[in-house]
Amino acid sequence: MASYRKRKNLWQAQVRIKGQGSISKSFHSRKDAQIWATNQEALMLSGKWKKKDYSTLRLSDLMKKYLQEVTPKKKGRGPEERRLKRLLRETDFMNNLLQEVDPPVIAEYRDRRLKDGVRACQYDLVLIRHAWNIARLEWGWNIETNPVEQIKLPKNNPPRERRLRTGEYDLLKINAMKTRVWYLWPIIEIAIETGMRRGEILSIEWINIDFERARVLLPMTKNGRSRWVPLSKKAILILGQVTRTVDLVFPISEVAVRQAWERLRKRSGLMDLNFHDLRHEAISRMFEKGLNVPEVASISGHRTASQLFRYVQVSDICI
């Protein structure tokens, strides 16, 4: 017999016949769930249905399937692909059979991964948690309750307060000019002038720049919304000096920019300065110029004041 229940906007169908066993799968509509359940019942009653054996599947099988089927549909698939491929290289952890992955196994990995940073650890655990839920609810895998949901996740680090110190801007500029990487310094200056993220800067197309109104449209941002970002006179000047060759202003991969930035901060002796700190610098400068919270949030794309305040010191804000 088939039964149905709605969980988190998905319809879960479960088919159970005495002597045959049970199977469940989730769908976006009740109709699809009913069609699938009817087919499964027919197979069971005809004796053609065989229960899939999940006892030999490993954690690596789960994450590989997630990488192949779920990640490509995401907006931020590039960074996630890199995280998953790194995670799959954790062979001792990934070789665990799914039926043996319990909360203590996840907790042990969490404690080991924390040595590489809280955010890195959080990303891994969130990916595993989501993959596990997808497998149970949408793929119909007969696996245990999600072990990641049964452990304590690491808390976020305190907000970074790193800004450019006296002389560091000039130091970065001098060393950037010594390299043949033409795009690095313009990208850094655009980041400081606008507060845009690295990925947002690399996504800028010439067609979306309104030079007359001094602004650029980002059709799709991290929070899933589009936004207009004001361009300062300096930002306009920088963009005007970039040669137009293709639709993208900076037809460069994120990997190439990240590697160029790593080399620059190493040459400059600024290994504690992250590229994302330039966003912190830009947002803080906006407040120092007298902009209020709603104005800065509309530029930076933050949807709440609490998110925005992680990028500034309270002393920067004029209330």
Image (cartoon, helix red, strand yellow):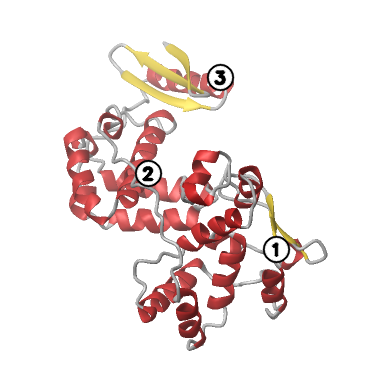
- Of residues 83 and 280, which is closer to you in this image? 280
Mark 1 lies on a secondary structure that is loop
The residue under the point 66% across, 71% down is 249
Q: CA distance from mark 1 to mark 3?
A: 49 Å
User: Is the residue 30 above or below the residue 101 in the image?
Assistant: above
User: Is the residue 107 above or below the residue 217 in the image?
Assistant: above
- Of residues 75 and 46, which is closer to you in this image? 75
Q: Which mark is residue 127?
A: 2
Q: CA distance from mark 2 to mark 3?
A: 27 Å
Mark 2 lies on a secondary structure that is helix
The residue under the point 41% across, 64% down is 274
Which class describes the residues within 10 Å of circle 1: few (<14), some (14-19), or many (20+)?
A: many
The residue under the point 42% across, 56% down is 81
Which class describes the residues within 10 Å of circle 3: few (<14), some (14-19), or many (20+)?
A: some
Mark 3 lies on a secondary structure that is helix
Q: Is residue 233 left or right of residue 5?
A: right
Instruction: Inspect the image, locate mark 1, and give the three-letter code of the amino acid beneath it.
Output: Leu
Q: Which residue is mark 3?
A: 30
Q: CA distance from mark 2 to mark 1?
A: 36 Å
Residue 82 % position (x, y): 40, 59
Q: Quadrant of residue 206?
A: bottom right
Instruction: Inspect the image, locate mark 2, and give the three-letter code of the amino acid beneath it.
Output: Leu
Q: Which residue is mark 1?
A: 231
Disc 2 to disc 1: CB gap under 8 Å: no
Q: Is residue 135 left or right of residue 314?
A: left
Q: Nearer the viewer, mark 2 or mark 1?
A: 1
Nearer the N terminus, badge 2 or badge 1?
A: 2
